[in-house]
Amino acid sequence: MASAPRIAAADALRLPNSLDLPAARPLASQLIERRGRPTVIDASAVGQVGAQCIQVLLSAKRTWEADGVSLSIVNCAPRMLEDLTLLGIDPATFVSGELPR
């Protein structure tokens, strides 16, 4: 049985501190460039996230799932988890791996 492709930490898409409206278009472009490839998104630096960027990330998760390719959002900053909850999104369905307590 073949193992899943490993993704080097250097290949992870690192999200910026502020995922506000102006960040939505560049984020979408970065994700479009990675479509069709397993993708890891590092959310450790996120200090603020707006609804537009959440929409981009949710769309990417659904697109990758439909394509049968893995997309993982990891190392979620506590503030991002709070913002997800405020927007009515269960972080456990959005983020890969263990959630900070």
Image: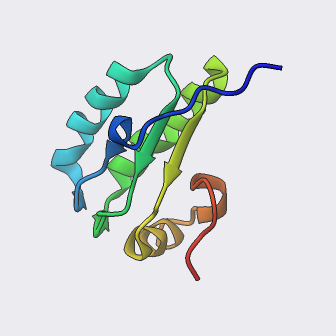
Residue 27 appearing in the image = yes
For this rendering, which residue is in front, 24 or 98?
Answer: 98
Residue 88 to residue 57: above or below: below
Q: Quadrant of residue 45?
A: bottom left
Instruction: Tally the marks.
Output: 0
| Quadrant for the N terminus in the image | top right
Q: Specify whether 79 is left or right of 91.
A: left
Q: Quadrant of residue 2?
A: top right
Residue 24 to residue 77: above or below: above
Image coords of residue 39 (percent x, y): 48, 33
The residue under the point 57% across, 27% down is: 64
Q: Specify whether 5 is left or right of 74.
A: right
Outermost residue, right side? 1
Image coords of residue 91 (percent x, y): 59, 64
The residue under the point 45% across, 63% down is: 76
Residue 90 appearing in the image = no
For this rendering, which residue is in front, 20 or 2?
Answer: 2
Residue 33 to residue 61: above or below: above
The residue under the point 55% across, 32% down is: 6
Outermost residue, left side? 22
Residue 32 to residue 42: above or below: above
The residue under the point 72% across, 26% down is: 3
